[in-house]
Amino acid sequence: RGTDEWQKLDVAHHLHPFTDPKYFDTKGPLVVTHADGVYITDSSGRKILDGMAGLWCVNVGYGRQELIDAAHAQMQKLAYYNVFFQSATPPQIELSRVLSEITPGDLNHFFFTNSGSEANDTIIRMVRHFWEVEGQPDKQIFIGRNLGYHGSTLAATSLGGMAAMHGMGKSLLPGFEHIMHPHWYAEGGDLSEAEFGLKAAQALEDKILELGPENVAAFVGEPIQGAGGVIDPPATYWPEIQRICRKYDVLLVADEVICGFGRLGHWFGCEAYGIQPDLMPMAKGLSSGYLPIAAVAYSGRVHKTLQEGGLFSHGYTYSGHPVSCAVALANIQLIKDENLIQTVHDDTAPYFRKTLTDAVADHPLVGEVRGAGLLAGIQLVKDKATKTLFEEDLAVAVKCRDHCLNNGLIMRAVGQSMVASPPLTITRAQIDELVEKAVKSLDQTAADVGV
Ligand code: PLP
């Protein structure tokens, strides 16, 4: 089929997640047919630099034979078996062992799911059950943050802090509360970055006291908010959050779905901020997106209580799917063999940050360049001096995203920010290409909106 035909069929039969169908009144979808390394190829044969690693997930890059071979070999041996019938499979056992070696502290226990959303749903049920078994059944409320994203199921939507998602279909369940997010540029006022980090963390203590610590089950946050626009917190923020959680015996959950598996130059994002969570959902980079798999890692304390609690009535047909586990194992092995995390930490992430900042920080359209590791957010502003944003309906970031695509680069538009999260295998030369295309797209956008 040709591009036109693919596009017509897609629009006729497929509802795209998080996409306004009206977009397709004027343009067809990008039909992606192949990918290799950090490039995707569309149905017209055009090669595009994937500055988003798919959806923040293809950490080892596309077309890795090791992962393909692992899936093939496992399918030949055992394509599927469940873990419900007091049964287990070697890839799932081995993946649990290997994960326990790389997760921080005593997060040595795992529950497998298919997606980050399901991992967060699992945490909500697991933690509420935990407190019931601990004899504190009132500890049920989850505290998340404004602009947090934890998935699209009903419970994960409620845990997240996306107002538009809450509003659609009355999707905010009772038992979920939200506090401010730590965005110094937008909300810091006259405070230093360090002071603002403490102020943003204080919002958690205030909320716990308002609700009563005896009612609060857990606090959940992404080490760096991804879908919220790549909001990296001040260094003072996470240690203070951890101190407050410990003080009130509120479990600390670091959502590692984006930050895990090397994105920030560490196995997990919480290590970059020096905190030790009680539970961690992980997905995306766990298999570099080659197959759907996600997991919840939980601590020795949680494990002990769950053991006492007996039957945990929860699980998915594909929990611990053997083929997904085999691919995740090959993926983790590849990250180790290629020393990817160290390379990101020591070389490509510092190079990316410097190259991007040098190239765009003084651009009239850019208010702030933020992020850490191979995760970046570029805040677009109408007026740099006053930090004034554009009128919403101008959809400035969408214009910039479309220019990026025309220039052969995928970047994502989030609110009035552009975000990037390339494969961890990206080279310095490819970073130069990414930045060059981003600058050209920013120039074209600035011309569109008269900045
Ligand atoms: N948590 C975070 C931090 C995410 O960014 C996402 C997805 O982007 C999710 C959870 C949900 O994961 P999934 O889309 O696999 O359900």
Image (cartoon, rainbow, N blue to C red):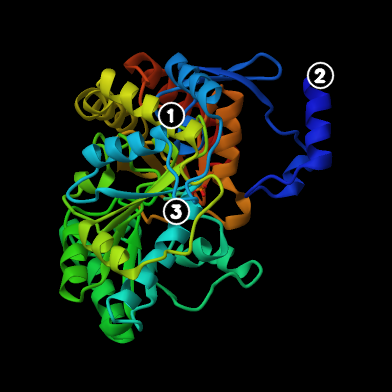
Task: Indicate the secondary structure of the residue bearing disc 3.
Answer: helix
Q: Amino acid at mark 1?
A: Ala
Q: Quarter of the image for the N terminus: give it.
A: top right
- Please tell me which residue is depicted at 27% across the width and 59% down the height of the picture: 303
Choose between 126 and 430: the one closer to the eye.
126
Give the percent coordinates (x, y) of residue 135: 28, 81
Lower sequence index among marks 3 and 2: 2
**277 and 79: which is toward the camera:** 79
CA neighbours of label 3 inside 10 A, class few (<14), some (14 to 19), many (20+): many
Which amino acid, mark 2?
Arg
**In front here: 376 or 92?**
92
Q: Which mark is residue 223?
A: none
Label 2 neighbourhood size at 10 Å, few (<14), some (14-19), many (20+)?
Answer: few
Mark 1 surroundings: few (<14), some (14-19) or many (≥20) residues within 10 A: many
Residue 218: which quarter of the image? bottom left
Q: Residue at x 27, y 42 (%)?
A: 268
Q: Secondary structure at mark 1?
A: helix
Say which label, 2 or 1, has the lower sequence index. Answer: 2
The location of residue 298, given as percent across then percent down, is 29, 55
Q: Residue 394, how many percent across, how many down?
A: 61, 50
Left or right: 217 in relation to 197: right
- What amino acid is at disc 3? Ala
Determine whether 223 is above or below 42 in the image.
below
Residue located beneath label 2 in the image: 1
**Alpha carbon of mark 3 to alpha carbon of mark 1: how far?**
19 Å
Q: Mark 1 — residue? A: 326
**Disc 3 marks which residue?**
119
Q: Measure the C-alpha gap from mark 2 to mark 1.
A: 33 Å
What residue is shown at x 41% (from left), y 27% (from top)?
423
Q: Nearer the viewer, mark 2 or mark 1?
A: 1
Q: CA distance from mark 3 to mark 2?
A: 37 Å
